[in-house]
Structures are given as C-alpha cells and as structure tokens.
Amino acid sequence: MSRTRVTTMTATLGMILLGSQLCVTFLCVLAIVGLKVVPMELGLWVGGGILAFQLAAIAVLKVTNNTWLGWAVELISVAAGFLQPAMFIVGGMFLAAWIYCMIQGKRIDAERAPVIAEYERALAEGVSEEEAAARAREFTANRGAA
C-alpha cells in the first residue's frame, strides 16, 4: 500500500510561484533574444537551461519540500538584469513574491504541524489513510473547540 506524503504549504506556494514564473521567464528569454542583447544561439541555449533549472526546482520542491533551488532561481532572475535592465524589476518582483510565499508558507506549516503529526501518528499505528485523515479532522475539531 502506497502512503501519501504530506506536502508543506511552503513547497506548494513555491511550486505555484515557480510555475507561474516559467511563463514569464520564457517570454523574457524571447525578448532578450529578440532585442539581440545576446546572440540567438547563446540566448536560446542559456534560456533553455534556465527554464530547465526552474523545472528542476519545481520537481525538487514536489519531492523533497526543499526550497534551495527556488532561491537560486530567484537570484538568477534578478541577476538577469545585468543583461536586460528591465529584468531587475521583473526578477525583483518575483523575488519579493518568493520571500512572501516562503514566510507565509512557514507560518501556515507551523499552524498545521500538530494536525499533520496526529495524521502521521495514526498512520504509524497501522490504520488506513482514510481513518488517519478522520482522526486528524477530529483532532482539528477538538483543538478548535478548546
């Protein structure tokens, strides 16, 4: 029986932001190549590499809840401003959104931690995922009533 892994809210918000940023990065790569800031071949290869790096950051968030690659993506986005100054603004906006998502995600994860711990405890006892989820809901209801 496969067990569902609990994804943190920090990772979920990070995946959403990086997924949205993928579209913007793609358009920025096309703009930088189209404005002939760099040669087309170089721009497409480097831009494709950055897009692949963003996809890898999303995958790492999904599998491990680790945000380090996401931070690297945001710093690369801001650093792209040295090629095209408008990227300082675009990258800065995404960096600000990333920081906000990380702060709020950690806050929400801290609030959810006791409920997730109850769910994990129930699974460790050998009950089904449905029963563990029911126990976690009951724990939340009892906690809210207290």
Image (tube, helix red, strand yellow):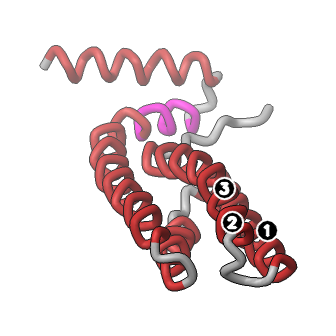
At label 1, the amino acid type is Gly
Q: Are marks 2 and 1 in contact (CB under 8 Å)?
A: yes
Where is residue 132 shown, x and y percent of the image? 53, 24
Who comes first in sequence, dot 3 or dot 1? Answer: 3
The x and y percentages for residue 37 are 66, 80
- In the picture, residue 35 is in which quadrant? bottom right
Task: Give the distance between the C-alpha atoms of the residues marked 3 and 1, in whole angstroms.
Answer: 12 Å
Residue displayed at 71% across by 58% down: 55
Looking at the rendering, the stretch of residues picked out in magenta corresponds to 117-124
Q: Where residue 87 sits in the image (x, y, percent)?
A: 49, 69
Q: Callout 2 environment at 10 Å: few (<14), some (14 to 19), or many (20+)?
A: many
Residue type of the residue flagged with mark 3: Leu
Q: Are marks 3 and 2 in contact (CB under 8 Å)?
A: yes
Q: Which residue is located at x 66 percent, y 71 percent? A: 32
Q: Is residue 53 above or below residue 6?
A: below
Residue positioned 16% across, 14% down in the render: 145
Quadrant of the frame with the N terminus: top right
Above or below 53: residue 37: below
**The C terminus sits in image quarter:** top left
Residue indicated by mark 1? 48
Find disc 2 in the rendering and name its residue: 29
Q: Label 3 vs label 2: CA separation?
A: 5 Å
| Relative depth, front residue between 9 and 38 | 38
Which dot, 2 or 1, sits closer to the camera? 2
Q: Main secondary structure of the magenta part?
A: helix
Horizontal placement of 140 versus 128: left or right?
left
Q: Residue at x 51, y 21 (%)?
A: 133
